[in-house]
Image (spheres, rainbow, N blue to C red):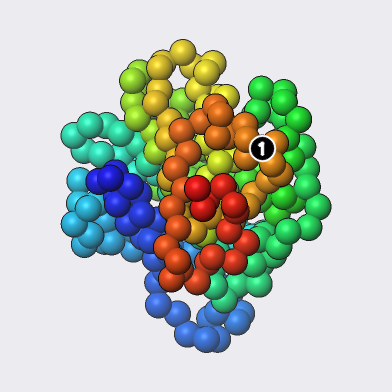
Amino acid sequence: SEIAKVMMTLSGIAYTVPDQSFLDELFCGPANPRKSEIIRELYRAKLTKDWRLVWGPTYTETFDNMMFIVKHVETGDLGLVLRGTVFDSLKSWCEDVATDQKRFDDYTGKQETWVANGFYDGFNLMLQSKSSGVEEGVNLTDFLRANAAAGTQVYITGHSQGAGLMPLFLAWLSTEAAGWDRGLSISGYGFAPPTPGDRQFADWVEEHLDSQLYINKYDICLLYTSDAADE
């Protein structure tokens, strides 16, 4: 669909980083995309020319996570974009490693569900991160509560690690928005998604949320791809 193409493009733009030398990378860590790089790429890509950066990017150092929000100039729809794994960042890869799991019941209607430690911790750190610039000091929850008008369509998207985080954010926002009573439409689009949780979590997402997963067999990120994504 056209919106899936837009979400895939936004997921790619999330990898935008400023140029830096090997020494910069070694001593300063992976570059965090600045607003200017994201704005430039939104204008350059035909599918995203009508979307504007309205919040973020926010950056969490522990796992090199980054996210931002864009808004369609005509419809007012919002897109929450989650960056995927930073290829040359050990911290970023550590989030993807499947180790232990933690309960995620708070966002799945108190049904027992479990998600991987790395995704759980990365998700919670990202929720606490705050934007700079025009929306300085505003976290994700407060921004969406103030800016997601009644009837707004909110998309959540990401590639690779970002696609793994997407169902967590989708479950979280669906739970939060239920208390706002605005009739928001919330959809998730994940590209080359890893498996973020157990079968109970996957089943709950499939039953209760609008989550669409896409796989390109030539994508290097097929490692750890969930069975659900193959359907």
* Quadrant of res 215: bottom left
Q: Which residue lies furthest to the top in this view?
A: 181
**Above or below for 95 versus 148:** below
Question: Residue at point 64% right, 67% down?
Answer: 93
Residue 210 % position (x, y): 46, 33
Question: Residue at point 49% right, 16% down?
Answer: 180
* Quadrant of res 54: top left
> Is 158 or 202 nearer to us in this picture?
202
> Is 52 or 109 nearer to us in this picture?
109
Q: Residues within 10 Å of mark 1 (few under 14, many from 20)?
A: many
**Above or below for 207 versus 211:** above
Residue 95 % position (x, y): 67, 59
Q: Which amino acid does label 1 sit on?
A: Phe
Q: Residue furthest right?
A: 100
Residue 88 % position (x, y): 57, 76
Q: Is residue 96 left or right of residue 59?
A: right
Q: Can residue 4 be seen in this view?
A: yes
Residue 47 % position (x, y): 22, 53
Question: Residue at point 39% right, 33% down?
Answer: 154
The tally of labels here is 1
Residue assigned mark 1: 201
> Is 197 or 40 nearer to us in this picture?
197
Question: Residue at point 25% right, 46% down?
Answer: 2
Q: Is mark 1 on a helix, strand or loop?
A: helix
Q: Can residue 83 be seen in this view?
A: no
